[in-house]
Amino acid sequence: METSKEERLQLALDAARLGTFVWYADDRGEPDERMLELFNLPKDGTLSLSAALASMIHPDDRGRYADAVAAAFDPGGARELREDIRVMQSHGGYHWVAVSARAFFTGDPPVPYRLVGVAAEVTERYEAEARRDFLFTVSETLRALTDPAEIKTRSADLLGRHLSVSRALYLDVTHEPDSDYYVVERDFHDPGVASIAGRYRADDFGAGLFAEWRAGRAITVTDVRTDARVSEAERLAYPATDVRAFAAVPLVKEGSHVATLMLHQSTPRTWQPGELALVEEVAERTWAAVERAQAEKELRQSELRFREVVEVAPQLVWVGRCDGSVEFANENWTTSTGVDPDGMDHWAMLTAAAHPDEAAGLRADLARAEARCAAFEGELRLRQRSGGFRWFLMRIVPLSDGAGSVLKWFGVATDIDDRRRADEVLREEEHQVALRLQRALLPRAVESPAGTAVCARYEAGTVALEVGGDWYDAFALPDGQLAITVGDVVGHGLDAAIAMGALRVAMAALAPHSAGPGELLSQFDRFAREVDGAHFATACYAQYDPASGRLRYASAGHPPMLVIDADGSARWLDGGRSGPLTGKVDDQRPDATDRLEPGATLVLYSDGLIERRREPITVGLERLARAAVELHHLPVEQFCSRLISALGGERQRTDDTVVLCLRAVAQPYRRELRADATELSGMRRSLTAWCAVRHVADTTVARLMLAVGEAAANAIEHAYLGQTPRSVSVTVSQEPDGTLVVAIADTGSWRSPAHPGSDRGRGIMIMRRVSDTFERHTTAGGTTIRLRLSPNGPAA
C-alpha cells in the first residue's frame, strides 16, 4: 500500500508539473527527473547546491538564493525556503523557477541536515507580469506626451530596449501618385548599428513583403540569408543596414495601410509568438496615442475653448458651462451614445448615457468633483446608439479663472472596451488554468458499487483566480464497504493544492488499514503534520455497507453530514465529531454509526456551499437542508448539480465548493435454483436474511416463505418432467411502501391438475390465499408466477 501511496503522490506531482529534491547540508543532492529537467540537466545527471549557485542560477539571483538557503538552515529562523530564481537553459537564456522547501535538523543543539522541497516553472507568470508592467509603462509614458513624433520615438525606444533588439522604428506611410513611401522620423538603435531615419520608397523593402503589409499581415524573418521570401537583391542589401532578422507589424485603418512598427536584429533571431503579440499591442497603443496627440495639436491650434482638453483622448468630447448647460458636444458623442445634449444639464447628459448600475455612483462622483472644483477620472460603461454598452475612460477637468471659480468643464471619454474585454479574457484564462490544475488533482470519477448511487461535483470560486484546497473521493474498501470523504485545506494557491492532492491520496492509502473512521482521522492528522501547507485542514469520512445499510462516520472540524430519508425528512449526523486537523494528533478521535434506508441520500460538502459573509453558519445549514428536501426526489446526479445551483444563486463565490452525494439503493433478491428440491432450504435461508436487512415484518416473511416455497417447489417438481432439468429463478423486490413484488419463473411445461380431487393445485390455492395479487403466465417458453405481498395483506 506504501507503493500505491507513493504512486498517487507522484501522479499529483506530475499533474502539477512539480519537481522534487533533497539537498543535504554537505552539498549532496537528490533531485527527481523533473527537477533535473528544470535545471537543464539529463535524467541521469546530478544537482548540488554549489553547482547551481556557481553556474546554473542567474548571477543576479545567486547571492539572494544563497542567503535564503542559509536562513532556512538557521535553527532560530522559520526553517523554510521560498524563492523564485532564474535558471539557465540550453539556448543560453533563463527561465523562472519557484522553489519551496523545508529544512530538517538533527541533534541538540539542532544542526542542519537537509532541505526537502518542490520546484515549478513560473516563467509564464513572470512574462505575463512583465508584459503587463511594460504595457502600463508604455501607456503612462505615451499618455504624458503631446508631440506625435516624440510618441513614435519613445514607443520605439521602449519596445526596442524591452525586447533587446538592434533597432526599432515606427514608419508612417504616405501615399503619393508614383509610389507609397515610408517615413521614419527617428528610430531606436543600439550603439553597434546606425540610424536609418529617412524617407524610403515602399518597393525598397521588397514588393512581396510590402504587399503582405498592405494586407495587414505581420511578418517575421528569422534570417534574411535563408528566408525564401527574401529576393537575392534584398538579401545582399540588408547587411548594409545591419539587418539579419526582422519583425514587422502593419497598421491598417479603414482599409488603408497607415503605418508599420518594425524591429531589426543584427544577428539571426527566432521571434516568439508572445513577442509578436506584444509588438502588435504596442503598435495599436502607439497609433492611438499618435492619433490622440495629433487631435490635441489640432485642438490647440483651433479654438481656445479646447485648449484645456489637450491631455485627454478626444473621442467623445463635450464642454459644460458653469450654469450647467451644454456648450458643445461633438458628433462622436451623439453618434456613439444616442443621447441628445440639447436642452440638457451637462451632468444629467452624462448620467443619462451611463449604465443604470453606474448612474447613481457617477452622479455622486460628479457632485463631489463640482463641489471641490476638482478633475474627475473613471472607467464606466456608456450607452451605445446601436444597442448595449461599451467601456470608456472618462476624464473631466475644470477651467478656472484667476480667482479659482470654474468657468467651464471640459470632458473627454476614450473607448477602452477592447482593452477591458481583453483583460477579462486574460483573467478568465488564468482562472481556467487554475481550475484545470485543481481538477487534475481530484479523482476523474467516483465509484458507485451495487446498492449505491454516488455523485460528486466540484465548483471553483468565481472570484479568486487561485486554486483552492477542497477535495473529495469515493473508493471501495477490501471488505466491500464504500468509503467516501470530503475535506478542505485552509488557504489558496499552489501550496494548498499540493497539500490537498497529498491528503486525498493519503486518505485512500490509510483507509484499508484503519479500524474505523475515528482511528483513520487520527492517523490522517499524524500524516498531515508532515505535509507542507496542511497546517490546518478539516475532513469528514464515512464507510457505508450496501448490504446492511450500516453507516459509520467521523468528522474533524468539518460541517456536519446531512441525511435526507426517502420520505423527504432531513436530519444532521452530529456524532463522531472532533477538532480540525492541525498536527496536534488526537489518538482518541470518535466515530458514530447510523443507518441509511433504501432511498435515503447522504450529503457531504465543503464550507463553500453554505458560508456567506456576515451571516451565521446556522442560516447556511438551514438553507442547505431546505434545498435538499425540495430536491430529494431527483436522481442523484441531478440532485447533486441542482443542489449547488440552488445554493449558489446569482452571487459570486469567493471559495471553492465540493458536494458528494451517496444514495442508498434497494437491491432486489435474485437466485437461480437448480431443478432439485435440495435447493429450497438454501433459498429460504438467503431470502430470510434479505428480509431481515430490509426490516420486513415477521408475518410478511412467513407469507413470503409459504408462497415462494410452494411456487418454487411446484416448478422444480413438475416443470421439467420428461425434459432435461434446467433452472428456476426467484426474484423479490421491495417497493417504498414495503410491498414485496415476487416473480418465480421456469422454462419448462406447465401441467394442469389431473382431476379436481388430486393434491395438484393446492400450491396455487395457498399462493392466492397469502398474497394480495396472484398472476400466472404460461407460454411455450415457460411459466412465470407473479405475486404482490403488502405489509397489511392476508395472514399466512
Image: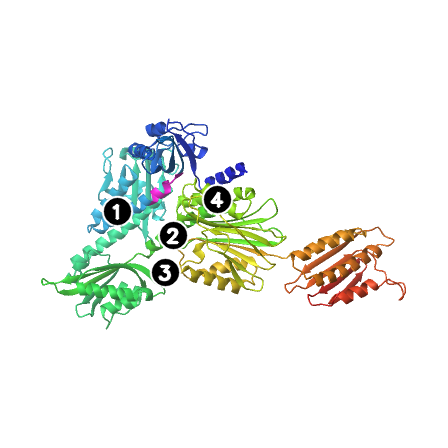
What is the number of the mark on residue 614?
A: 3
Q: Is residue 125 magenta?
A: yes
Residue at the farthest left position: 402
Q: Is residue 726 visible?
A: yes
What is the number of the mark on residue 137?
A: 1
Residue at the farthest bottom position: 343
What is the number of the mark on residue 464?
A: 2
Dominant secondary structure (helix, strand or loop) of the stretch shown in magenta: helix
Local crowd size for mark 1, using a 10 Å CA cut-off: few (<14), some (14–19), many (≥20): few
Local crowd size for mark 3, using a 10 Å CA cut-off: few (<14), some (14–19), many (≥20): few
Q: Distance of mark 3 from mark 1, alpha carbons?
A: 40 Å
Local crowd size for mark 2, using a 10 Å CA cut-off: few (<14), some (14–19), many (≥20): some
Please name the amino acid that badge 4 sits on: Asp
Residue range corresponding to the magenta coloring: 120-128
Q: Quadrant of the N terminus?
A: top right
What residue is at 31 percent from the left and 47 percent from the top?
A: 132
Which residue is label 4 attached to? 587
**Relative height, residue 119 to residue 717 (above, below):** above
